[in-house]
Image (cartoon, rainbow, N blue to C red):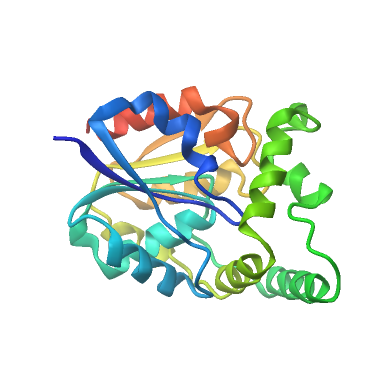
Amino acid sequence: MAQELVLLPGLLCDARLWRDAIAPLGTGVRPMIADLSQDDSIAAMAARTLAVAPARFALAGLSMGGYVALEIMRQAPERVTHLALLDTTAQQDDEARRAKRRAGIESIKLGRFIGVSTALLESLVAPQRLGTPLAAEVQAMSERVGQEAYIRQQTAIMERIDSRPGLDKIKVPTLVGVGELDILTPPTLSQEIAAGIAGAELVTFAGSGHLSTMEAPETVAKALRVWLGR
């Protein structure tokens, strides 16, 4: 019987984020990509995902998807068999970061949505991937998600709670992965998560920035395979 795997995308990401990392897992895994574009709170994103997810499933989230994964662990921990948190943080935004997100939302409302800006792209992928076809795919992905979803997602992200106090309650096999060159959620944040979850495995993806599943899919797939076998 195939193993159920629910995948949670990041901000301005869709199924493309996971494509190359889950393909090597083969027919032994049945993936479901959650839709995190419809809601403006992390709690609502988690509830929407749980409403359509299998009864029991492994759960993996990247960046914003990690915030939603941690919320699912609060709402329905009994349904999750394995947990993977990639390129994310358990911390909440500070006021400076919230102010920056609010300013970004206002500027989008006044101007034209262009998807991932040059400045944001530089924080999403490692420097050597700027100007490559992969960078173009990231841009196209953000345009598919669109302006309205971006505003909802940013609103949800800046209002998320601090998940660190609940890390010690997580009792399922947990993978914490992070790109070696991730500057958006640096490795120290993943180290903090791994330290808070008993038995968590911390994996660093060499040469990858924030979008590790696109930048280092083979390495991520290897880590996922080991994780699902635990």
Number of numbered discs on residues: 0
Q: Residue at x 35, y 63 (%)?
A: 49
Front in this rendered view, residue 32 or 203? 32
Relative side of 107 to 39, left or right: right
Q: Quadrant of the N terminus?
A: top left
Residue 47 lies in what quarter of the image? bottom left
- Image vertical order of residue 75 relative to residue 144, above or below: below
Quadrant that contains the C terminus? top left
Q: Is residue 62 left or right of residue 195?
A: right
**Left or right: 60, with 157 as reference point:** left
Q: From where the camera sits, is residue 150 visible? A: yes
Residue under the point 57% across and 45% down:
188
Query: Residue 11's quadrant in the figure?
Result: bottom right
In the figure, residue 137 lies in which quadrant? top right
- 190 and 133: which is toward the camera: 133
Is 184 on the left-hand or right-hand side of 55?
right
Q: Is 120 rendered above or below residue 223?
A: below
Q: Where is residue 178 drawn, in percent x and y?
A: 53, 38
Q: Locate residue 30, reporting x and y percent.
A: 28, 39
The spot of residue 186 in percent (x, y) is 62, 45
Taking the spot 38% from the left edge, 53% from the top edge, the residue there is 196
